[in-house]
Image (cartoon, grey):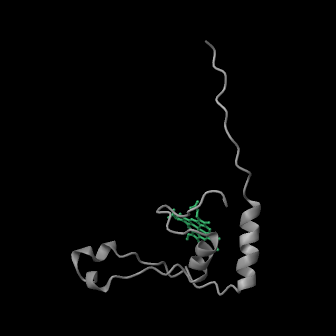
């Protein structure tokens, strides 16, 4: 996990702390008010009410990051196998 920066599908999170902070804030998403009530209204993401602020302390976030780091495996170079001729 730690070797695949930047994270999320747009790659807009350069550190894993950014990702954890997003969840800690309850997945806030920007709402462009000018689109409310317009045909583009349906494109405004709605955050599900079950996603709430986690209120993790800095120490808890640091513990979570330490856990996520244990899920990583070292990068390996994949060598091309010798193929039959
Ligand atoms: C504290 C709890 C969580 C942590 C630490 C966490 C961690 C992460 C990380 C590190 C990624 C980036 C993966 C990558 O780019 O390779 C990720 C992506 C994602 N997570 Fe979570 N996650 C949490 C909770 C959740 C929850 C509750 C949901 C769903 C409700 C969720 C849904 C997703 C989705 C859909 C992605 C892919 C997003 C994208 O590629 O843009 N995660 N998560």
Task: Measuring from the top left, give residue 31's x and y in whole percent.
Answer: 37, 82
16 is higher (above) or lower (below) than 21: above
- Which residue lies at the image location 50% right of the left edge and 63% below the top edge? 11
Q: Residue furthest left?
A: 39
Examine the image and state in which quarter residue 13 appears: bottom right
Residue 51: x and y, percent?
55, 79
Q: Quadrant of residue 14?
A: bottom right
The answer to whether 28 appears left or right of 3 in the picture is left
Point out the quarter of the image occupied by ligand 1.
Answer: bottom right
Residue 47 position in % (x across, y down)? 46, 78
Residue at 66% across / 21% down in the picture?
82
- For the N terminus, give its image quadrant: bottom right
Position in image of residue 71 (x %, y %): 73, 59
Q: Quadrant of the C terminus?
A: top right
At horizontal 59% and vertical 61% (from top left) the residue drawn is 5
Tell me if residue 57 comes above or below residue 2 in the rendering. Answer: below
Label total for image: 0
Q: Is residue 68 left or right of residue 4?
A: right
| Quarter of image, res 64 | bottom right
């Amino acid at each position: 996990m730690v070797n695949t920066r930047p994270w999320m599908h747009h790659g807009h999170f350069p550190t894993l702390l950014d990702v954890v902070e997003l969840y800690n804030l309850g997945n806030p998403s920007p709402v462009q008010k000018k689109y409310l009530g317009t045909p583009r209204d349906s494109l405004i993401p709605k955050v599900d009410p079950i996603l709430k602020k986690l209120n993790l302390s800095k120490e808890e976030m640091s513990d979570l990051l330490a856990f996520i780091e244990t899920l990583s495996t070292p990068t390996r170079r994949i060598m091309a196998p010798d193929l039959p001729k």
